[in-house]
Image (cartoon, coloured by chain):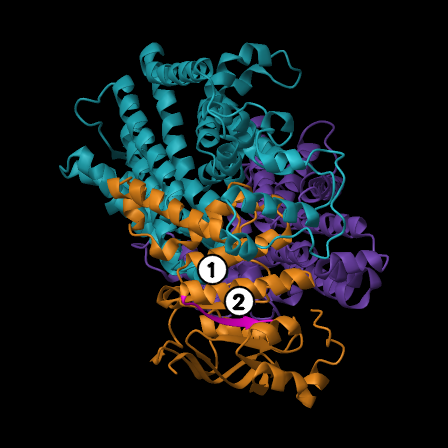
Amino acid sequence: MIFTSILNGLITGTIYGLVALGLVLVYKGARVFNFAQGEFGTVAVFVAWILHTEPPGLPMLVALLLGLAAATLMGLLVERVVVRPLSQKPRVILLVATAGVAVGSIYLQLLLGEAEARVLPRLGGDRVFFVLNAALIWQNIIMILALVVIGVALYLFFSRTALGLAVLASSQDNLASQLSGVSTRRVSSLVWGLAAFLGGMAGLLQAPLSVFTPGFMTTTVLFPAFTGAVLGGMTSLPGAFVGGLGVGVLSQLGADYIPETIPGGRELVLFALLLLVLSVRPQGLLGKEA
Amino acid sequence: MATSTAEATAAVRRRPAAGGLAARGAVASVLVIVVLLIPVVLPSFRASQATRAVIFAIIGLSLNVLLGHLGQISLGHQAFVGMGAFASGLMVGKGIPFFLALPLAGVIGALAAAILGLVALRIRGLYLALVTLAFGFVAEESIFNVNALTRGGEGMPAPRPPGFLSDPAYMYLCLIVLAVVLLMDWRLVKTKGGRAIMAIRHDERVAATLGVNVTFYKLFAFMLSGFLAGIAGSLFAHWITNIATNDFVLDLALVWVFMTVVGGLGSRAGIVIAATFFALLPILLEAIFPLLQLLPFINADMQGRLPRIVPVIGALLLVLTLTLYPGGIGQQLLPIRRWLAGGPFRDPLKHGRKHASRPAKRRRRRGSPPTPAGDGAATTTPTEAIVDAPGPAEAASAVAEAARATRPTGDGGA
Amino acid sequence: MAQLLEVRNLSIRFGGLQALQGVDLDVGEWEIVGLIGPNGAGKTTFFNCVTGIYRPNTGTVKYRGRDITKLPTHRKVRLGMGRTWQNLGVSRDLTVLQNLLIAQHASVRYGPLAGLFGAPGTFAEERNLRRDADEILDFLGLREVRDEVAANLPYGTLKLVDLGMALATDPEILLLDEPTSGMGPDEAHKLGDTLRFLRESLDLTILMIEHHVPLVVGVCDYVYVLNFGQILTRGEPQEVQRHPEVVAAYLGDQDGAA
């Protein structure tokens, strides 16, 4: 049933949207495509899981918060060690560098543990209820709420607060911002810390849905999130929101309706979508510049 | 990079003495002999792993055409390598001789790359990177999963060609292909095609006004890159003799990009060395694992997971290269290459005394007084030099003097 | 006299800005024509439209009577249109010689694949190219810096290299974009001699964007004045110089400083 597909698509789309928000944030703040955005989530999940299951076995909520903190720290570290030294280099170099961070993170996880699937408990329990033939759990509701709240908060931050405007100004004209008294270093740390926080949150919300493996956010969520960000507009926060959900729905439809004889329906849809958007409207649905 | 080539050639001004030539010849010969003896000297398993290094080197050179020469990024290179591999396996399975399947696999890779090339005509930079990534995924999840093409989970057999069944023999075969690829890259850079591609990297519009058909040469670069990747894929398939979809994944493509960057964009030698390092790293680590166990956080059951450390080290090297040593290994090799080409070992621009034989340099010694500030009295324009018909040397020194007048004083070098 | 270059009704718009409007311009064979105007008037945009970097909204460009408006840039170059750049087309990390070799692209007699596989003719042709490049370098007095990396050379020298690159494309008409920028008054005057020399010895036609009024007056046969994307006036340099609107447009720029 098509409504089932759409609803399921929307649910996956909320995570895409959350990650896309982080991607757009970094792009607005630093003009960088952050390939490590997925790993912020994976790291949060692994830290939370280890703290919860290995002795001394902290309570779930505490473990989650510490996982979030770990992700944020990782973001700040990446900014300091990788992004800042390369800040004057071409953007493609930074992309490759963040890809390096992602790959390093994934294989470090594989090195320190096995590739097996692990489980994180769900928020609100495992009770399933049905809406329009789609199975939902409380976790899904929390995801949607999180996306809405965060989306609105970021939007207000960037349009209403002085700090938010400073971030935008800094990305558009670094020198002028410095001359106006904005500390571009603090802004840079803020952007990456915030993006890592968002990434961590996305990972923590996604993991309980099924199982998680090393690098799961990067291998399953990052690329669709990028496509969503491009679709909505890499410079538009509401765009990330819309684009993430849109990609969720479209890729779900692709997976459900493209016949079995053509494997990889999801990837084909994403590839076609990417080509379409970049050829016809490179700035995305809601973006103002490419 | 182009800089190292320019500096290397610029430095070759005086022929070294006979003894110097002999020394250079000896070193070069030793290098060649060592490489040729590797397959024979190593035990069979190791020879097999060394073949992987050779194949990685070819892949690195293929990526270099896009990344180093054209300046565009490809994050989906596993697509071209995989297509070449499966195509080769299919063809040989249908009775086509290996030595025909090999170049045809290259053609398949070239055609696939042409698709991306067409996209690259309109989409650039970061967004193109995303598209290449997407393309890699499509290959991984979609094309490589079509059972008719790839035999799915059971894998596709790809037998070695007769006469090259043993590991050392196959490695020699791959070495020959690598040598041909190295020659091609050398000729590419030294001729019209390579120059056009690099002009496009520098500035497309300027390249167009210099007569370069930008569309053609962009496609040419992509297709060449795909061709080499396809060939590498074919060699890979018949090396491992049985290929499955899982052999061509994103992680590998990223490691290849890191490898090429660490090797140094545009540096053939650097890329070959980086490829060898990355391919042989797991073996190296296995060999020194007993030592590694002494470290606190390494325990015995990590041994099976050692190959996973390669991407981690790769990522570290990548970040190091990007931040501290942008020219990669190639940059570090520059003195050696300069010496082998007959020039001095130390950088002549930094050790200027060895270079004193040209008149212009003599005028630029440190501490010599600057020309009186120019109202043009110190300048002799090219036209005057020609119309008054002095010799070329005089015209040359006139330009040098003019150059000195406009330059900050006392600066004898770069 | 045969019109080498004939531009009619050229217009182009970027978003809300009408950069060029109804521009008509002729360059006769072996003329030296100047295109002057205040900063932002659209002179470089005009060059970009003529050479095909931009696609104009309206208008035609004719070369020897043939409509080349829609022709891709590299084909125009092969027809004989050479061009220099205000910000220099020189690749900073290559040597002067390598830059010239790139510029000879259109005249190279072997194809890219032949070059790739080292076909025998390529080596000989490469030697020919170097010989031709050396001729140009000698001509401009740049032989000394032949193997210097461009980044190490001063701006004035690079301007000459840029000119050398344009000459290496074997042009019939040279479009020069501010050839004297960065030069002092004497050097600019000497450049004028060079240009006349080029016209005489190489049969070149020249269209140049310039700010340096004495040079324009001294060298150009004819001058067009562009202001706010439209041709303000045209004529012999002396008349144009005295034209009241031209003076007004240049208010503040009268001594020829860029």
Q: Which chain carries label 1?
A: C
Q: What residue is shown at x 75% (from left), y 56% (from top)?
A: A174
- Seen from the viewer's position, the closer of residues B236 and A90 is A90
Hey, which residue is sitting farthest left in the picture? B95
The crowding category of the residue bearing disc 1, from other C-alpha atoms within 10 Å (few below 14, some 14 to 19, many at least 20), is many
Residue C146 place in picture, x, y as percent:
51, 43
Residue B211 place in picture, x, y as percent:
40, 60
User: In the rendered structure, which amino acid carries the disc numbered 2?
Assistant: Leu
The kind of secondary structure element at disc 2 is: strand
Residue C208 lies in the magenta stretch: yes
Q: Chain A is drawn in which colour?
A: purple
User: In the rendered structure, which amino acid carries the disc numbered 1?
Assistant: Ala
- Seen from the viewer's position, the closer of residues B247 and C37 is C37
Q: Residue C176 carries which label?
A: 2
Range of residues picked out in magenta: C203-211
Hey, which residue is sitting farthest right in the picture? A181
Image position of C128 (left or right of C42): left
Residue A241 place in picture, x, y as percent:
62, 64
Q: Chain C is drawn in which colour?
A: orange
Q: Mark 2 lies on which chain?
A: C
The vertical placement of C209 against C110, above or below, is: below
Tell me the residue that label 1 is attached to: C166
Q: Chain B is drawn in which colour?
A: cyan
Residue C195 place in picture, x, y as percent:
52, 65
The kind of secondary structure element at disc 1 is: helix
Same chain for the residues under marks 1 and 2 in the image: yes
Q: How far apart are marks 1 and 2 (CA)?
A: 9 Å
The vertical placement of B351 against A282, above or below, is: above
